[in-house]
Structure formats: C-alpha cells, structure tokens
Amino acid sequence: MLFGALCYQEFIMSGSENRSFYITTPIYYVNDKPHIGHAYCTLACDVLARFKRLDGYNVKFLTGTDEHGQKVEASAEKAGIDPQAFTDQVSQKFRDLTEVCNFSNDDFIRTTEERHKKACQKIWQVLEDKGYIYLGSYAGWYAVRDEAFYTETELTKGPNGEKIAPTGAEVEWVEEPSYFFKLSAFEDKLLELYENDPSFVGPDSRRNEVISFVKGGLRDLSVSRTTFKWGVQVPGNDEHIMYVWLDALTNYLTAVGYPDEESEDYKEFWPANVHMVGKDILRFHAIYWPAFLMAADLPLPKRIYATGWWTIEGQKISKSVGNVIDPLSIIEEYGLDQVRYFLLREVPFGKDGDYSKRAIISRMNGDLANDIGNLSQRVLSMVFKNCEGKIPEHGEFTDADKVLLDSVSSLHQKLRNEFDKQSFHKGLESVWEVISAANKYVDEQAPWALRKTDLPRMGTVLYVLSESIRQIAILLQPVMPQSMERMLDQLNLPADVRQFSDLTTPLASGLPIDKPQGIFPRYVEEEGA
Ligand code: MSP
C-alpha cells in the first residue's frame, strides 16, 4: 500500500505531468452584497487550490468582480452615485469576503481595471479580424437581471401577463444596432468538443443539458449594446459597448496576462484547468466561451463545472423574502471552518442544497465535535498524560494496527480522485469513514486499560492513533485550514512538513507535544434561540 503510494508520488513528481493548475470562480456582479451562495463557489475553488498546492502544484486561483452592464448601471443610479464609485464600494465587500472566509486567491480581478479593458478590446479585434464579428441590428427579448438574450419560444407568461425568461427574470423588448458574433458557425465544433472530451462539462447531468441546448440550434449572438454606456467600448466604434458577457468571460484571460501570450503567467497557466460556475451561468461558459476561444484560435479551458444552488430553510435566497444570509453572520455564530466543512460535506457537490440551522448544528456536533474532535482530544490527552508528553515508541504492528494505518494511507489517493471530479462530499465521506474506524480502534484497543497491563502495547496503540491523526489533519488542511493548523501545532509538527509529500514520512517517536485543547467545541443552543 505504502509502496504503491510512493510510486505514484515519484511518478507525478517526475515532471511527466503538467504541474500547474489554474482555477477560477465566476466574477460576481456588484449590483448586490455578497451572500452565502457567492461564498460557496469561491470556497469550492479555494479548497481545490489549497489541495493542489499541498500536492506540489504551482497554482493560480482567481476570483473577482464583474462590474459592467445595464444591471450594475441601474443599481448605481438607484443608489444615487456614479457607477465607478458604486462598483468601488461593492467590489470591496467581495474582497472583504475573501479575507473573512480565508480564501487563498492569488489575484482579484475587477473588470473596470485597465488591464482588462486592454484584453477585451484585443479579443474583440481578433474576432473581428478573423471575420467572426459583423454589424447588424438586434430586435428581441433581453433580461437585464440575467444580462441575457432569449428567444420567443423560451419565454413564459408571468402572473400579470409579463414575459418571463426560464430563469424567472422579466424580459424587455430591445431594438438597436448591434454587432453579432457568428455563434451559429460553432454548432458542430461544440458538439464535437463535448463528444470528444466528456469531462469538459461537469457534472454529467449538466453536460447533457448543454448538448441538447446546442443541438436545438445556435443563433448568432448580439455582442454589443448602444442604449447604455457602462462597459468597455467596442474598438473603432464608440457608439457601442461590448456585451457584458464577452467582457466578463475574458477576465479569465486578462488575469494571466492576455493579450501578451508570451507572458510568464500565460505560458504557465493558460488554458485554465477548471472554471467553477453556478448552474445558472453554465450556458455562457460551456457554449459561448469555448466558441469565442475557438474563433480567436486560443486553447480551451479543460473543464467547466456547474455547482448547484443553495436555498435557506427551503426557500430561494432573495431580498424580497428577506432571507439573504450574510456569510459573516453565520461564520460568527458557528465558526469559519465549521461553515466551510458544512457547505462542502452536507450536499453532493453539483446538486442543490438547503441551508438550515438544524443541519449545520448536526454536522458540528456529530462530524466535528464527536468524531474528529473527540478522536484527537482523547488520543493526544492520553499521550500527554501517559507518555511523558511525547509521541511514544511503537513495537511491532498487529493486524488491527496495519488495517488502520493502511486505510489512513489510502486516503490521499482517494481524495485526489474525488477532488479531481469535484466530488468534495465523497472525498470527505471517505475521510470520515477512517475517522470512525479510528474511534472504533480506540474503543477496541482500550489504551487506558493497557496502561495498567501492557505499557509498550499502549505506546504502540497511541503511536498508531497519533500517526493517523497527523495524516488526517494534513489531508483536511484544504477544507479547514485554521483548525487543522491547530491540530498539527498540537502535534508539534514543524510547518515545513505539512505537505502531501510529507504524508509518507511517519511521525517521529519522542517528539514532544503540547497540552491538547479542544478544537471543535459542541454547539449548544441558547435557551429560546
Ligand atoms: N457576473 C456573472 C458571472 C460572470 S463569470 C464570467 C454572474 N454573477 S452573479 O453574481 O450573479 O453570480 C455569481 C455566482 O453566484 C453564479 O455562479 C451563481 O450561480 C452563484 N450564486 C448566486 N446565488 C446562489 C445560490 N443561492 N446558491 C449557490 N450559488 C449561487 O452571474
């Protein structure tokens, strides 16, 4: 088992694989404050970015804000301030969220930055020069809320006879001169892409939706607007500003230095490994974006993954319902790592999920306080009290010891497999199976009884458990960075041996440990809460 793990490690360290990893979140509209749904997508990217860094990759993790478009212009107007001042304010809230949630993004892009304008105008120019953009006029339905165009057949009637897009957004009739992108020319190429590379869109259920949308026929896409001003100007025609989605999608290139295709970052990180997006914006990423890139002769991202949506206590998150949860308030209430763990463990990634107080408390008290918290607290307390505060020596391992140690050392590869498919819940499930096995092993081996009968065996049992805790804590760092840092600190493990490549170097006997403190307290509800 251990030998197998080493071989794999050597294989991937041998440079036979590309060791860079570029992951992006959607860039968030600044028409509103951040809520838990926004934090969710960035959290998933943060966990993958941290995981890959610990696994020896050179990582670039990008997030940011989408600041142009009619919706943002209207929100600024409503707030009575100019759009730039408005976007400065709201963008800062998203930046603050990255701090509060301990997100490890390497860059934070704003689409109002000069570097981005340059990238947008360049990609436009390339598309135009290659004959994929032409001037025409648009007459059709537009939903400002989605910043998206819809065909008549996609619409339904609302309660007051108004026309409604499939997303529930109201549409308005728009007639104006417009540039078009020849999306229709990419139908076959896109279908070929989905066919040849089944992992391009995940999860599979969403991939099928994308395929049937494209099979339904693609019309050329209106890519400029003339009826408002808040956007990037079309090169050579200042009457037009770019359609906000062409502008927004280009952020992924801007951040790696485009249009400079010789820049270090571009060469290292493009194409992106994963664009993580919400299910509502998959169409833009899995259809428009690869079509733009193919038209510009640029390499395509490797994977687009669509997350599900969160509801709160069964209801859609909405300002009018008044249930918009500020991520800061739940982090204050339950703790950051508890919220991070809950969001990724509770719901199969890719599916919709419901946030409820009951559900988070049950995860905190069950998985965290009882399972991992209790395991580390009771084991390290016994080591501290009964082994002179040092990791004990171990004797020969019994079958039971080997079973536990083998299951712990298989976790790294299991997590890699699951996290590479964005199956965070499954990865975590497999860690918790081992945590339960470790707790069962404590009960069966009863080291407190061995203390009176067989001290060397007690030492071996506590060694096996401490070593298991070390590996589990190293592996869980991406999900709960602060708590796992504390756990590893309690083991007195130096900061420079907490990488995944250190998993195969067993804990040294004789290492002094600190007096353990509980890391995951039980959540006790206050009377009347
Ligand atoms: N600006 C565009 C994205 C451009 S990417 C080139 C946008 N912004 S958004 O702010 O409206 O949404 C950003 C992300 O938040 C989307 O992926 C969306 O799915 C996600 N969420 C918004 N509400 C959500 C939930 N209730 N639950 C989970 N994710 C949610 O679209």
Image: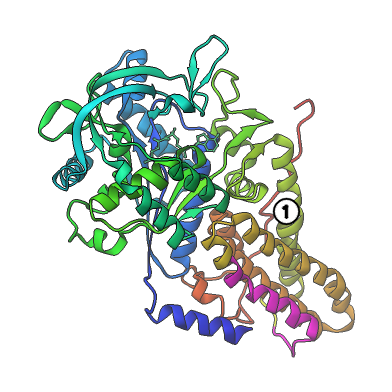
Q: Is residue 346 above or below residue 146?
A: below
In this orientation, which residue lies closer to the viewer: 263 or 286? 286
Under mark 1, the amino acid is Asp
Q: Which residue is mark 1?
A: 367
Instruction: Specify start and end residues of the magenta stretch as a single range.
Output: 393-415
* Position of residue 181 measured from the top left corner of the image (x, y, whole percent): 26, 38
Name the residue at 63% across, 36% down.
Answer: 333
The picture places residue 107, in percent across and down from the top left corner, at: 33, 49
Q: Quadrant of the C terminus?
A: top right
Pointer 1 residue Cβ closer than 8 Å to ligand 1: no
Badge 1 element: helix
**Residue closest to the far bottom:** 396
Main secondary structure along the magenta-highlighted residues: helix
Confirm whether residue 458 shows in the render.
yes
Q: Name which residue lies at 12% across and 29% down.
A: 237
Measured along the vertical axis of the image, is residue 513 above or below residue 274? below
Which image quadrant for residue 528? top right
Q: Image height check: is 297 above or below 94?
A: below
